[in-house]
Image: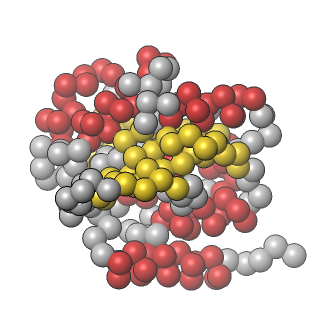
């Protein structure tokens, strides 16, 4: 599991804890990449000790942090979890059997529960969210086929990555189980609809600029 974090002291402990709560946590490699945090992210992670590998780098964005985690990871299956999100208790037990049972599948994906932490009624909605990388488990070979996350994109990198998955013909299998809790809050990296739209536009523009196969 790769957890990119930037100034996530308030949330990252819960994110890592949700990974350690998985039934196979003892055999799960957890790599946390601190992307130049200036808050007490390191202090929030200190309680995990040797259960995690903590990498630090200058602030270069979430794509660079994920790529650094990939470079350090040793496993054949890769998962991602942003520092302010959570994996549900059944995440790994729902996704892992899908890949083990189907050697031809490249990606296993589950459903996402979206929660607004600033909503007074605590409202939530559940959906299949094909863009969020935290809702899936990937075979390592996927990144050999489609490449790494685009470090020139500060937003929209997930849109770009999933577009390249489709272009490469990667096979995805799905479960109806909710595997990811996506927590929206005022301090999140994606702050406005305008920023989201701009990031998505940049990702689409890159897709259109790529040469089409004959």
Instruction: State whether residue 195 is above or below residue 5.
Output: below
Residue drawn at x 50%, y 35% is: 91
| Horizontal arrangement in the rendering, residue 128 relative to residue 39 (left or right) | right
* Quadrant position of residue 205: bottom right
* Residue 3 visible within the image: no
Most foreground residue, 52 or 95: 95
Instruction: State whether residue 85 is above or below residue 211.
Output: above
* Quadrant position of residue 77: top right
Whole-percent x and y of residue 83?
31, 46
Residue drawn at x 54%, y 48% is: 111
Most foreground residue, 52 or 172: 172
| Horizontal arrangement in the rendering, residue 18 relative to residue 9 (left or right) | right
* Residue 114 visible within the image: yes
Whole-percent x and y of residue 11?
23, 44
| Horizontal arrangement in the rendering, residue 107 relative to residue 92 (left or right) | right
Most foreground residue, 182 or 126: 126
């Amino acid at each position: 599991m790769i957890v990119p974090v930037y100034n996530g002291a308030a949330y990252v402990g819960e994110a890592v804890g949700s990974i350690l709560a998985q039934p196979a946590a003892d055999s799960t490699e957890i790599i946390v990449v601190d992307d130049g945090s200036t808050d007490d992210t390191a202090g929030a992670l200190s309680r995990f000790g040797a259960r995690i590998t903590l990498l630090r780098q200058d602030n270069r964005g979430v794509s660079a942090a994920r790529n650094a985690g990939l470079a350090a990871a040793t496993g054949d299956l890769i998962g991602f979890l942003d520092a302010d999100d959570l994996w549900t208790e059944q995440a790994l037990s729902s996704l892992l059997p899908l890949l083990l049972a189907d050697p031809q599948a490249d990606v296993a994906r589950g459903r996402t529960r979206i929660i607004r932490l600033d909503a007074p009624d605590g409202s939530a909605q559940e959906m299949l969210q094909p863009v969020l990388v935290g809702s899936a488990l990937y075979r390592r070979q996927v990144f050999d086929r489609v490449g790494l996350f685009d470090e020139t994109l500060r937003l929209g990198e997930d849109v770009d990555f999933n577009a390249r998955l489709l272009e490469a013909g990667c096979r995805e299998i799905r479960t109806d189980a909710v595997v990811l809790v996506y927590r929206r809050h005022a301090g999140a990296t994606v702050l406005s609809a305008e920023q989201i739209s701009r990031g998505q536009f940049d990702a689409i523009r890159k897709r259109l600029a790529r040469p089409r196969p004959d």
